[in-house]
């Protein structure tokens, strides 16, 4: 399955994953972790352990600091 992954404010990537992949599986090819981003589908956050059900997602980096 090919999925377009748009990293907000950065680049857009084409990622190939297995048909039973989860949203978390889209992140390692981009050197991202589920702990540092939110995955969004149609402007709604989705759990990273949910199966991929779309061909386009948006990834937003979380702000950290103190």
Image: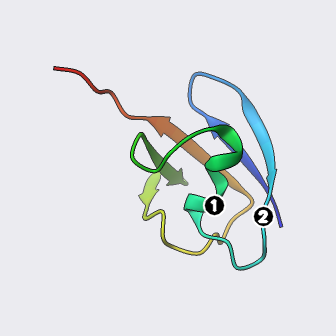
Q: Residue at x 39, y 47 (%)?
A: 35
Image location (x, y in percent) of residue 8: 56, 30
**Which residue matches tag 1?**
25
| Residue 23 is at least partly visible in this image | yes
Q: Is residue 64 left or right of residue 30?
A: left
Q: First in sequence: mark 2 or mark 1? A: 2
Q: Which mark is residue 17?
A: 2
* Crowd class of label 1 (few under 14; some 14 to 19; many from 20; radius 10 Å): some
Of the pair 8 and 31, the residue shown nearer to us:
31
Q: CA distance from mark 2 to mark 1?
A: 7 Å
Q: Is residue 62 left or right of residue 46?
A: left
Seen as rendered, the residue at the extreme left is 66
Element assignment for label 2: loop
Image location (x, y in percent) of residue 22: 60, 69
Q: Please state, as top left, top right, bottom left or bottom right, where the N terminus lies in the image.
A: bottom right
Q: Residue at x 43, y 65 (%)?
A: 47
| Residue 43 is at least partly visible in this image | no
Query: As displayed, is residue 59 above or below residue 25?
Result: above
Seen as rendered, the residue at the extreme bottom is 20
Q: Residue at x 58, y 62 (%)?
A: 23
Picture quarter containing residue 21? bottom right
Query: As displayed, is residue 13 above or below residue 41?
Result: above
Image location (x, y in percent) of residue 50: 51, 73
Of the pair 23 and 33, the residue shown nearer to us:
33
Element assignment for label 1: helix
Of the pair 53 and 43, the residue shown nearer to us:
53
Image location (x, y in percent) of residue 41: 55, 56
Q: Are marks 2 and 1 in contact (CB under 8 Å)?
A: yes
Query: As displayed, is residue 12 above or below residue 29?
Result: above
* Crowd class of label 2 (few under 14; some 14 to 19; many from 20; radius 10 Å): some
Q: Which mark is residue 36?
A: none
């Amino acid at each position: 399955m090919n999925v377009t992954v748009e990293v907000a404010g950065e680049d857009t990537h084409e990622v190939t994953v297995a048909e039973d992949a989860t949203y978390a599986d889209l992140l390692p090819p981009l050197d991202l972790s589920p702990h540092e981003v939110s995955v969004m589908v149609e402007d709604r956050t989705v759990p990273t352990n949910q199966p991929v059900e779309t061909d386009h997602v948006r990834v937003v980096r979380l702000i950290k600091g103190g």
